[in-house]
Amino acid sequence: MNAPVTVLKVPQTESATPLISEELAHFVGAYATAAIPAAVKARAKHLILDAVGIALASTRYDFAHRALTAISGLAGAGDFAVIGMPARLPLRDAALINGILIHGLDFDDTHSGGVIHATSSVLPTVLAVGAQQRASGGEMLAAYILGVEVAARLGAVAKGAFHQVGFHPTGLIGAFACTLAAGRLMGLNEKQLVMAQGLTLSAGSGSLEFLEDGAWNKRFHPGWAAAAGITAAALARQGFVGAKRAYEGRFGLYASHLQSYFDPANLALATAGLGEIWELQQVAVKPYPACHFVHACVDAAATLTREHKLDAEEIEHVRALVPAEVVKTVCEPVANKKRPANSYDAQFSIPYAVAAALLRGKFTLDELEDDALGDPDILALANRVQYETDPAATFPRHYTGEVVVTLRGGRTLRQREAINRGNGERPLSEADIIEKFRSNAARAVSRDKAQAIETLLLSLDQAADAGPLADRLGSA
């Protein structure tokens, strides 16, 4: 009889290839503020200005006051300012409310490739943690920029697939970006930054179920991401151990959340071009207060109306061509989209947005007021808007859109927007962004107050202390 064979089990050694969490930790933890290009810093300050203007406008809406009442009723007053509101809250609560204010009108910027609203989570994080750490304005700006770079890349790995499985990248991916931005300001070392990302794996969240009924869930996703990121960074700073393989692991971010949509070959996008290609330059500033997926069709509809002086009675029916990947978000369920239940529903509705733009030649916050939502002409036309998937779409690089109007008598008018306005390849200018800020700020504060905030933010990197700087964004 042969002697039994002993099989030796060789211990598995970790690959020499750095983990994504290690590369991101090194990038965010070690990148010198002075090495960030001047053009990137300038654009970042304008993105921050845009976000603060939106937050100011949000203070006039019911959702903002309900949120503030709810959160201030938990831990009470604190030391950290809320943008445009007479309140001071504990650190994480202030970040949560500021995220709600920036994102609440769905007017905030989007990184197209990552399909993520990075500013709405990263800015509240650096405002709160920067003030706590008494960081300089330059350090706070650098943490914001590096956080946006992380958010854009981590979002890009999914190539738009998070939306297909019902996750909102802003809440999910945003939490990791906030963790690293907070960790940099808190002075975490690279090992701690790796641990912090592993902890965030159990904290990021964001469901798209709100699309079914116009619920307000999405409004608090960025602020929740900020609170999650701050918490993870604080735990890691004290040695609380987090998972190492936050992204590549068997139950890591992408395998667990994307399931069959996960392609491991895309993981390289998470670290591609760090410090060389600045994705912040590709962040799109919104010209319209609605989901970015409807913008190209709104522009197309408004252009047709301007050029042809369209009348609702002339329009037989309308076809809106959109990328297949956005259908679940802005086209379905069809009945809900054709008759939005509220303003939030309308912001995610191709039929409503196209109909409003065709009839009014514009789509502003005014088109989300009750009189517009109940306008029988808009609703009647929305009922005649059908969607089709666009075989020529270049999503997610561009959020393309095309509107085809058929008039009574058979005449057809067509307008295509191959690159949505505001996209990194078709950006809004600095002057456009400043004008948008002023328009939004005017809804809530005096011209003098708005001018002071504008001056403050556009010279952010010259501030010696982020504490007083953050305070000046609050309401006296």
Image (cartoon, rainbow, N blue to C red):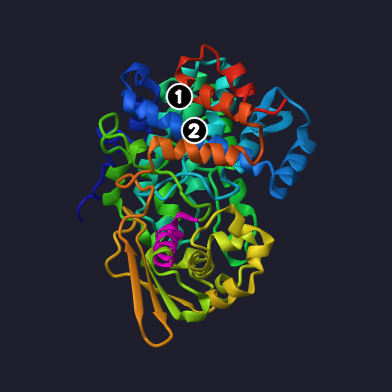
Residue at 33% in and 31% down:
23
Residue most extreme to the left: 2
Residue that extends furthest to the top in the rendered view of this protein: 464
Locate the N terminus by quadrant: bottom left
How many numbered dots are placed on residues in this image?
2
Disc on res. 141 = 1
Magenta portion: prevailing SS class: helix
Res 420 seen here: yes
Q: Which portion, as a residue range, is magenta?
A: 291-305
State the separation of the CA atoms marked 1 and 2.
9 Å
The residue type indicated by label 2 comes to Ile
Q: Which residue is mark 2?
A: 48
270 over 196 or under it: above or below: below
Indicate left or right for 257 with 232 as reference: left
**N-terminal label among 1 and 2:** 2
Mark 2 crowd level (few <14, some 14–19, many ≥20, 10 Å Cα): many
Q: Position of residue 42 (x, y in %)?
A: 38, 27
Name the residue nearer the viewer: 437 or 270. 437
Residues at discs 1 and 2 in contact (Cβ within 8 Å): yes
In this picture, is 86 found above or below 298?
Answer: above
Residue in the image at 75% along x and 46% along y: 66
- Residue 402: give its label: none
**Which quarter of the rendered picture does the C terminus lie within?**
top right
Q: Is residue 223 visible?
A: no
Secondary structure of the residue carrying tag 2 is helix
Q: Is residue 292 magenta?
A: yes
Q: Residue at x 58, y 20 (%)?
A: 469
